[in-house]
Structures are given as C-alpha cells and as structure tokens.
C-alpha cells in the first residue's frame, strides 16, 4: 500500500515558504519525499538555494528538485521555472560526482524558459545602475541574486526575445532566434551602461545547443508527464522556490522575485489545476530573515539580530550574503497562509531560539500615524515607516537539537508554537530542530490544545 493511504494524507501536496525564503523548504521536501512519487518545481530558477543535509553530507540544490536525493522518484523541472542550462549541468555533474543518480529521474519541461548569459549581465547592470543612483540597497535597488531571473522572465512575457528549453534541441532554430535577439540585447545592455562584450549569435547557438544535447534525454512535455503519472495513481509533491512574500503579485513589491512563488504559481507553472492539491505545507522559520532590499518590519539591527544570524548560520546558500534577521512576524505569516491556502505549518530552526531570556512575536503593525493594523500590505512604498506591535513570550535555555518529540520540548517552546497556531489558525504539524533529516518530528496533536 502507498504510504499516503496510511496517513490519510491527500495524494498531492505542496511545500511553500511563508516568509522571504530560506525557511528550510529543501529539508522538508527531502523529508516528505518518501510519501510521494514525483517532486515538481514550478517557479523560480537558480536564485533558489535549497539545502538538504543527509548525515554529514550537505547538498545545495538550485534548480533540481530536492527529491533527487531519494531513490526512485521522478523529479520534474516544470514549465514555470527559468533554467540556466549550464548551471543545471553543473548541478547534475556535482550530484553525480557525489554518487547521486541523475538520469531518467530528472525531467525538464521543453517549455521552461532559458536563462542566457546576457540575462545575468542585464540583471547585474541594472542593479549596479540603481545602486549608483540611490547608493542604498532598498532605495530602488532590489538586491537580486544576479542569476538573470528578472530579465529571463521579462523575455518570457515579451515573447519575441524568449528561448525555451525545447529550442536548444534545434540548432538552426536556436541560431535564427539568437540572430534576432543579440543585436537588440547589445543595445539594451549598452543603454544600461554595461561593458558590452559582443554577443555573437553563432557562438551562443553552438554553446547552448551543446548544453541542449547533453540535456536532451531529460527534456520533455512535463505537463503530459505529470498528468500521466497522476492518472496512474502516483502522488505528486510540489516544491516551491523563493517564498510567498517574494511573489511577484503578492509579495512586498517591488522587492520581490519575478515569478509567482506562492502556491498560486503551481497551476500555471506545472500545468496541474490547483484543485488537485489536497494539502499545503507552509514552511515557517521560527524567526524572520530576508536577503536583499525591501520592507522588514521586525528586522533587528542590533546584537540580538547578530545572535540569531550566528546561531542560525544565516548566510545565503546561493550568494553567501549575510541574511537580515528579526523576530517572527505573524502578521506576514498569517497573510501568506491565507494567500497560499496553507493547511499546516512546518516550523523550522526552532533550535536557533534557545538561550534568549524572552522572545518577541509581531502581532500587528503600527502605521506612522499611530494607528494599528493586523493586515499585511504587499507594497513596499505603503509599508514605509511601519513598526512592529509585539507580544513578549518567555524564552528557554535548553538546546533543542536532540528533541525527538513534542513532549521533549521545554514548556516555553511548546507555548511559542501554541501561540503561532492560535494566531494563524492552522496547526504546526512538523517541527524541525536541526538541519539533519532526523532532527524533525511530527506533531499530530495541536500544540495549542496542550498549552
Ligand atoms: P530553503 O531555501 O527554504 O530550502 O532554505 P535554505 O536551505 O536556503 O536555508 C535553510 C538553512 O537552515 C539550511 O542551511 C538548512 O540546512 C538549515 N536548516 C533547516 N532546518 C533547520 C533547523 O531546524 N535548524 C537548524 N539549525 N538549521 C536548519
Ligand atoms: P530560496 O528558494 C531568499 C530574493 C533576493 C532578492 C529578490 C529578487 O532559497 O528560499 P532575484 O534574483 O530572484 O531577482 O532576487 O528575491 N530571493 C531570495 N531570497 N531565498 C530565495 O530562494 C530567494 N530567491 C530570491 O535575495 O531580494
Ligand atoms: Mg534558500
């Protein structure tokens, strides 16, 4: 019998970040993978960095679903992802070198858009231009990962300058398209003040057709593939990249990424109707972090923030940048739960909060005029000057990394989770107390009912 029939878990589920990324989605997907047959990425690109620790081995996945580390699973890079083919090949080679099988278990949509070198140049050039202009991160400059994500999605929407993975399999077609693209792109790069190295259509066509040849066995129509699997009774887990508050439509615009990274991106980014997803796991770290610019009401620019950063090793998986750290913002989390339709929370990095006398949780925002709201505003401009309204909870001293059960947690940690459940209105079903696979436990009983 399939494991899901034991757990009465709906057959298809999603894992999504409820904050600004790096909540530990990779770890939770790796953990849940045993109950599913196909793991599907539906958005983002190599801006994502999902860390999975198995024993002492640490893997950082950027484009390949975290299910690749488990045997016998189909890992799908859906049409909503933007793929940097050379980065993807590096990732494949890196995994194989470490003994991870990558073959028929990796499938890439022929409709996924391609991230080209000029997209990365455009991304960096625009960031540098904005930096020069404003001189300050968050004053216009987004603080992107410079992985070419925005420019690649821009081309997708512009259509006539876009390349899709299927195009890499036809050299003549690729060359024809690049002949149109290159001249225009050089002019655009020049307008951004970039150092333009000439873009030679034939060179790019040769280089990317070669990457296409290596990827050919993996490239397919993943929409039919995933529906064939579903019809055959297989179970699908969707792996969100980035996070709800970075969603292009529902995040802290313009300090967001360029895709629908909430669960709302699943239907368009995978070809699977939203109503087929029976369960949404919202991943929430026990405090808040954010990389790059943009509003962050609970940010701690002090020793406490530094302490969280050190204990949580809060440095980017993709860019190595120190992450901005702050207290848990439940106004933001509750908003993400609403937008994503989350059914349950997986609370990660709870162990990082050991050793604080007291912990603060944001339950409202005070506007500059002194009035208070419990609503999130997905617009950076309109969140200017907001300050947090906190509830203060008692902290706990003990390290949690060896806890294997909710009863093992200090009473204060149980109350912390109970507070979350009560405020947000959904149960905390999974608790993570360390990076390793085994440092996680399920909580079938609501913490709120125990408090
Ligand atoms: P993702 O992008 O959401 O997959 O998250 P990242 O991998 O970028 O960042 C999460 C980091 O926290 C990684 O280094 C994980 O190994 C680590 N991690 C995940 N869960 C826990 C946890 O419960 N405790 C601790 N201390 N680290 C964790
Ligand atoms: P995972 O999947 C954290 C942020 C960037 C920047 C903004 C736009 O690991 O949680 P982009 O390069 O996408 O145009 O950058 O979005 N960002 C992330 N921050 N984790 C991520 O992914 C992110 N993906 C994008 O830091 O502020
Ligand atoms: Mg990450």
Image (spheres, rainbow, N blue to C red):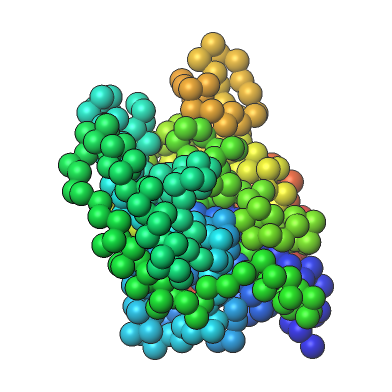
Please state if 116 lies on the left or on the right of 362 as rendered.
left
Question: Residue 72: image x %, image y %?
Answer: 59, 86
Please state if 12 lies on the left or on the right of 336 as rendered.
right
Query: In the image shown, does 89 or 402 lie closer to the viewer?
Result: 89
Residue 123, picture quadrant: top left
Q: Residue at x 61, y 20 (%)?
A: 372
Q: Residue furthest top?
A: 369
Residue 7, picture quadrant: bottom right
Question: Residue 432: image x %, image y %?
Answer: 54, 65
Please state if 275 lies on the left or on the right of 129 as rendered.
right
Query: In the image shown, does 382 or 419 lie closer to the viewer?
Result: 382
Q: Quadrant of the N terminus?
A: bottom right
Q: Residue at x 80, y 56 (%)?
A: 275
Q: Residue at x 65, y 39 (%)?
A: 335
Query: In the image shown, does 52 or 208 lie closer to the viewer?
Result: 208
User: Compared with residue 253, is residue 102 higher up or lower down, i.e. above or below?
Assistant: below
- Please give the count of numbered marks on the rendered protein: 0
Question: Residue 247: image x %, image y %?
Answer: 55, 43
| Residue 314 seen by the camera | no
| Residue 202 seen by the camera | yes
Residue 413, picture quadrant: bottom right
Q: Residue at x 41, y 44 (%)?
A: 151
Question: Residue 128: image x %, image y %?
Answer: 25, 36
């Amino acid at each position: 019998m399939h494991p899901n029939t034991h757990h009465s878990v709906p057959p298809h589920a999603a894992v999504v970040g409820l904050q600004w990324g790096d909540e530990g989605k990779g770890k939770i997907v790796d953990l849940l993978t045993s109950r599913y047959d196909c793991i599907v990425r539906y958005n983002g690109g190599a801006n994502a960095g999902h860390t999975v620790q198995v024993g002492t081995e640490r893997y950082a996945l950027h484009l390949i679903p975290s299910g690749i580390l488990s045997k016998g699973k189909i890992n799908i890079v859906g049409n909503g992802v933007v793929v940097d083919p050379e980065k993807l090949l590096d990732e494949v080679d890196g995994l194989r070198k470490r003994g991870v099988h990558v073959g028929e278990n990796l499938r890439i949509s022929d409709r996924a858009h391609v991230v080209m070198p000029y997209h990365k140049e455009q991304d960096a050039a625009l960031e540098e231009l904005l930096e020069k202009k404003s001189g300050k991160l968050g004053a216009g400059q987004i603080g992107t990962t410079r992985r070419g994500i925005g420019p690649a999605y821009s081309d997708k929407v512009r259509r006539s300058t876009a390349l899709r993975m299927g195009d890499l399999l036809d050299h003549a077609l690729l060359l024809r398209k690049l002949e149109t693209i290159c001249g225009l792109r050089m002019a655009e790069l020049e307008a951004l003040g970039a150092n333009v190295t000439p873009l030679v259509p034939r060179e790019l066509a040769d280089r990317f057709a070669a990457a296409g040849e290596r990827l050919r066995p993996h490239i397919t129509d993943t929409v039919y593939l995933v529906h064939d699997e579903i019809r055959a009774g297989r179970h699908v887990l969707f792996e969100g990249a980035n996070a709800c508050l970075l969603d292009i439509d529902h995040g802290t615009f313009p300090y967001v990424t360029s895709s629908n990274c909430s669960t709302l991106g699943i239907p368009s980014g995978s070809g699977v109707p939203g109503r087929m997803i029976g369960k949404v796991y919202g991943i929430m770290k026990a405090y808040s972090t954010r990389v790059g610019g943009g509003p962050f009401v609970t940010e701690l620019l002090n020793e406490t923030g530094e302490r969280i950063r050190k204990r949580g090793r809060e440095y980017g998986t993709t860019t190595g940048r120190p992450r901005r750290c702050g207290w848990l913002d439940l106004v933001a989390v509750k908003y993400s739960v609403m937008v994503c339709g989350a059914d349950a929370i997986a609370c990660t990095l709870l162990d990082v909060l050991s050793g604080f006398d007291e912990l603060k949780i944001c339950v409202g925002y005070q506007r500059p005029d002194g009035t208070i709201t419990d609503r999130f505003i997905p617009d950076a401009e309109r969140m200017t000057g907001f300050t947090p309204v906190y509830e203060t909870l008692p902290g706990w001293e003990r390290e949690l990394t060896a806890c294997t059960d909710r009863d093992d947690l200090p009473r204060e940690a149980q109350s912390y989770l109970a507070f979350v459940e009560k405020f947000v209105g959904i149960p905390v079903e999974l608790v993570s107390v360390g990076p390793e696979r085994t440092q996680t436990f399920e909580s079938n009983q609501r913490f709120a009912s125990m408090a």
